C-alpha cells in the first residue's frame, strides 16, 4: 500500500508547469496532480487498474521536479515509485525493467554488459549496430551511439588501488553502469579526491545501490545489497562515501527508508549521513583556480541532483575553478528523458524531451556537462543522431582534464586512465 497520505495535496496546480510529461501532453492525468488522483483511486479500489490509467502513472519520469516546487511537500515521484513496486511485471515496460534488473544485478551480468559495450565500439560491432539501426532505428541499440569512445576496465575488479585507511578516507562508490561504461570517470574521481588530500578506498565487496530492484517490486534484493554496502563501508574505516552518479546518490541516501523497521535501520542512518556527491566534496575543497579553458561548457542538471538533493551550484563552482566558462542552457533543470530506462520503455516521450534538451544548448558551445551515466548516454546518442558536434561529458572528467593539463595530476592516474571520447 502507498504508505503516505495522498490528501496532503491541496490541488493548487503549482507543480503543473514543472512536470515534463504535462508540458508535453497538456493532459491533466499526465500531471502530478492528476497522478495523485489516480493513486488515490488505486488505494481505494480493489478492482484491477484500467490500462489507460496505469499508463498515465507509468509515464511518470520520477524526475521529482514536482516535489521541488510543491508547497505541501507531496512526494509524488516517491508515491509513483511505490506504485511501480506493486505493479512490477504487469505492463510491457515494467516487464522489460524486471529483465534489466536481473541482468544488471549480478557481477556476471555486468561483465557481459561491459563486454557487449566494448565489442560494439569495435569496427565490426559498429558496422553491425549501424546495419541493425537501418532496419530498426528506434531500437535500444541506438544507445550505442552514446557510449564513450573508449571503455576502460572496471575499477572495482581490475584496477583497485586503495590507499591505506586513515581518518580522512573516502569510500568511492563505483556503481554498476559507472563501473562498466564510465570506469575512467571513477578513476578520475579517485585522482581528484587524492589531489584534495583524501585517501581513497575502492572496496570490491560493494554492490549495486539497489535502485532498480527497490522500485521494481524486489525490495528484498535491494535490502540485501544495502546491507552489504553498509558492511563494506563500516569495514573500510572511511569517513565519507563519495558517489559520482546522481541516481545512486539519491538511493544511497534513502537507505534508512529502505531498511526502516529492520535491525539495520540505525546503521543505515549512519551510512546515509556519510554519503556525499563527488561534486559536493570537491567544491568544498580549496582546489587551485586555473586560467580560462578555451572551450565554453553548458550544464544539464540531473533530476536526482537538482530536484531530489538540491545540488545545483556545486558543478558550477567546480567547473569555474577549473577554468571553464559556463554558458547556461535553457531549462537546464528539466529532465532529458533518460530517467533510468525510461528512454527504452517510453521512446516517444523520451525523445521529445531529448529534442528539447538539445535545442536548449547555446550556440557555439560544444560541451554539455551531465553528472549521471543515464543522462550522458542518452544525451550523447541524441547529439550523434542529430549530427551535432557537441560532446556530453561528466563534470568530473572535465575538471580532471583541466587539472591534468595544468600539471596537477602527473602521477596519480593509472596507465589505462584516459578521457572519455577525448
Ligand atoms: S502536488 Fe503539490 S503543487 Fe501539485 S497540486 Fe498538489 S499541493 Fe499543489
Ligand atoms: S516526478 Fe516528474 S514526471 Fe512524475 S509527476 Fe512529478 S514532475 Fe511529473
Image (cartoon, grey):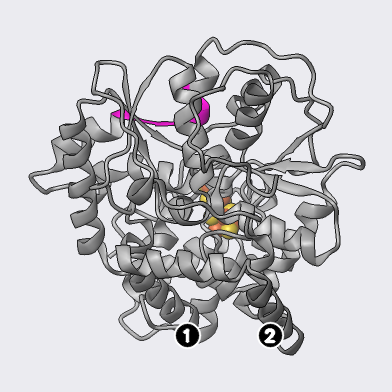
Quadrant (top left, top right, bottom left, bottom right) of the C terminus: top right
Q: Nearer the viewer, residue 269 or 20?
A: 269
Quadrant (top left, top right, bottom left, bottom right) of the N terminus: bottom left
* Mark 2 Cα shell of 10 Å, populated few (<14), some (14-19), many (≥20): some
Q: Residue at x 80, y 54 (%)?
A: 358
Q: Position of residue 378 (x, y in %)?
A: 65, 60
Q: Which residues are magenta?
A: 274-281
Q: Position of residue 41 (x, y in %)?
A: 41, 72
The answer to whether residue 124 is magenta is: no
The answer to whether residue 279 is magenta is: yes
Q: CA distance from mark 1 to mark 2?
A: 36 Å
Q: Residue at x 82, y 48 (%)?
A: 360
Q: Nearer the viewer, residue 266 or 281?
A: 281
Q: Position of residue 203 (x, y in %)?
A: 27, 40
The answer to whether residue 92 is left or right of residue 260 is right
Write down the residue under mark 2: 132
The answer to whether residue 150 is left or right of residue 49 is right
* Mark 1 Cα shell of 10 Å, populated few (<14), some (14-19), many (≥20): few
> Which quarter of the picture shows residue 328?
top right
Residue 308 visible to the viewer: no
Q: Is residue 61 above or below residue 153?
A: below
Judged by depth in the image, the label closer to the viewer, 1 or 2, is 2
Considering the whole magenta stretch, tell me its main secondary structure.
helix
Write down the residue under mark 1: 50
The answer to whether residue 178 is left or right of residue 351 is left
Amino acid at each position: 500500500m502507498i504508505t503516505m497520505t495522498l490528501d496532503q495535496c491541496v490541488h493548487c496546480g503549482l507543480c503543473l508547469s514543472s512536470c515534463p510529461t504535462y508540458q508535453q501532453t497538456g493532459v491533466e492525468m499526465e500531471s502530478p496532480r492528476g497522478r495523485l488522483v489516480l493513486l488515490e483511486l488505486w488505494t481505494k479500489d480493489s478492482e484491477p487498474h484500467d490500462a489507460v490509467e496505469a499508463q498515465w502513472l507509468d509515464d511518470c519520469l520520477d524526475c521529482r521536479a514536482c516535489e521541488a516546487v510543491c508547497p505541501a511537500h507531496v512526494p509524488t515521484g516517491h508515491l509513483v515509485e511505490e506504485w511501480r513496486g506493486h505493479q512490477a511485471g504487469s505492463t510491457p515496460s515494467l516487464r522489460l525493467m524486471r529483465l534489466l534488473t536481473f541482468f544488471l544485478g549480478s557481477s556476471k551480468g555486468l561483465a557481459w554488459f561491459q563486454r557487449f559495450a566494448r565489442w560494439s565500439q569495435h569496427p565490426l560491432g559498429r558496422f553491425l549496430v549501424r546495419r541493425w539501426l537501418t532496419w530498426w532505428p528506434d531500437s535500444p541499440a541506438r544507445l550505442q551511439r552514446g557510449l564513450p569512445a573508449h571503455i576502460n576496465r572496471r575499477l572495482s575488479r581490475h584496477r583497485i588501488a586503495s590507499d591505506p585507511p586513515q581518518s580522512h578516507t573516502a569510500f568511492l562508490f563505483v556503481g554498476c553502469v559507472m563501473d562498466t561504461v564510465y570506469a575512467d570517470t571513477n578513476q578520475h574521481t579517485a585522482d581528484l579526491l587524492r589531489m584534495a588530500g583524501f585517501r581513497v578506498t575502492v572496496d570490491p565487496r560493494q554492490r549495486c545501490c539497489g535502485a532498480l530492484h527497490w522500485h521494481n517490486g524486489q525490495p528484498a534484493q535491494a535490502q540485501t545489497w544495502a546491507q552489504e554496502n553498509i558492511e563494506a563501508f563500516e569495514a573500510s574505516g572511511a569517513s565519507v562515501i563519495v558517489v559520482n552518479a546522481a541516481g545512486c546518490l539519491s538511493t544511497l541516501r534513502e537507505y534508512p527508508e529502505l531498511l526502516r523497521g529492520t535491525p539495520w535501520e540505525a546503521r543505515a542512518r549512519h551510512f546515509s549521513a556519510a554519503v556525499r556527491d563527488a561534486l559536493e566534496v570537491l567544491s568544498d575543497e580549496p582546489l587551485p583556480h586555473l586560467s580560462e579553458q578555451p572551450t565554453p561548457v553548458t550544464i544539464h542538471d540531473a533530476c536526482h541532483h537538482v530536484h531530489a538533493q538540491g545540488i545545483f551550484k556545486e558543478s558550477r563552482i567546480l567547473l569555474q575553478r577549473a577554468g571553464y566558462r559556463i554558458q547556461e542552457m535553457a531549462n537546464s533543470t528539466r529532465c532529458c528523458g533518460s530517467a533510468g530506462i525510461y528512454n527504452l520503455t517510453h521512446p516517444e516521450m523520451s525523445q521529445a524531451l531529448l529534442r528539447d534538451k538539445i535545442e536548449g544548448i547555446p550556440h557555439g558551445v560544444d560541451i554539455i556537462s551531465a553528472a549521471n551515466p543515464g543522462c550522458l548516454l542518452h544525451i550523447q546518442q541524441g547529439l550523434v543522431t542529430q549530427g551535432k558536434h557537441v560532446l556530453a561529458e561528466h563534470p568530473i572528467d572535465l575538471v580532471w582534464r583541466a587539472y591534468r593539463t595544468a600539471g596537477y595530476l602527473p602521477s596519480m592516474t593509472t596507465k589505462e586512465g584516459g578521457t572519455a571520447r577525448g
